[in-house]
Amino acid sequence: MTEKPVAIACDHAGYALKEELKKYFERIGVAYTDYGTDGVCSVDYPEYAHRLCTALQQEKHELGVLVCGTGIGMCMAANKHRGIRAAVCSDTFSARMTRMHNNANVLCLGARVVGVGLAEDLVGVFLGTAFEGGRHQRRVEMLNNLDENGKSEER
Ligand code: RB5
């Protein structure tokens, strides 16, 4: 579980689920920061992904949750940011494994794909699972190198 507040953001399609997840955070005693959007008026998901990812890059948060209709657009936008490793998950196995093996720091959810109960489970598993390190550390460093110079490793 992260020491810092969890960041959460959404577009209009993800707004209702984001509000449910905020109630979930309150029930389980997890602090969060909401980066919008604040209603169901149509907005552009890259803007909200950028707000949340910038806050992670500034080390205000260790982990974030992005919600849009499918989770896919948010994930694409988030992964354009240096140091962000975002994964769309709709099963708890993937949510666990992406923390353990990929050290994912952003969970993307599709509000039109998963229900509230499953979304809560996905978030709970994501927040409650630690990175395994070991051989996976080298692979995450290779991802970081791709961020820096478009090469998976220096040779
Ligand atoms: C909005 O209609 C929808 O395109 C968006 O929420 C998301 O699913 C994009 O990937």
Image (cartoon, grey):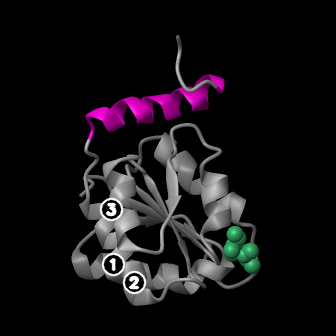
Residue 130: x percent and y percent? 25, 52
Q: Amino acid at mark 3?
A: Arg
Q: Which residues are magenta?
A: 133-150
Between tags 3 and 1, which lies in front? 3
Q: Are marks 2 and 1 in contact (CB under 8 Å)?
A: yes
Residue annotated with mark 1: 121
Label 1 CA crowd tier, 10 Å (few <14, some 14–19, many 20+): some
Q: As drawn, is 5 to the left or to the right of 151?
A: left
Residue 84 vs 94, above or below: the answer is above
Label 3 CA crowd tier, 10 Å (few <14, some 14–19, many 20+): many
Residue annotated with mark 3: 96
Q: Residue at x 38, y 88 (%)?
A: 117
Q: Quadrant of the N terminus?
A: bottom left
Q: Residue at x 56, y 46 (%)?
A: 54
Residue 95: x percent and y percent? 38, 64
Q: Amino acid at mark 2?
A: Leu
Name which of mark 3 and mark 1 comes first in the sequence: 3
Residue 49 vs 71, above or below: the answer is above
Q: Secondary structure at mark 2?
A: helix
Observer-nearest of 14 and 32 = 14
Q: Is residue 7 visible?
A: yes
Does the stretch in magenta take in 142?
yes
Residue 133 vs 148, above or below: the answer is below
Q: Are marks 3 and 1 in contact (CB under 8 Å)?
A: no
Residue 42: x percent and y percent? 76, 79
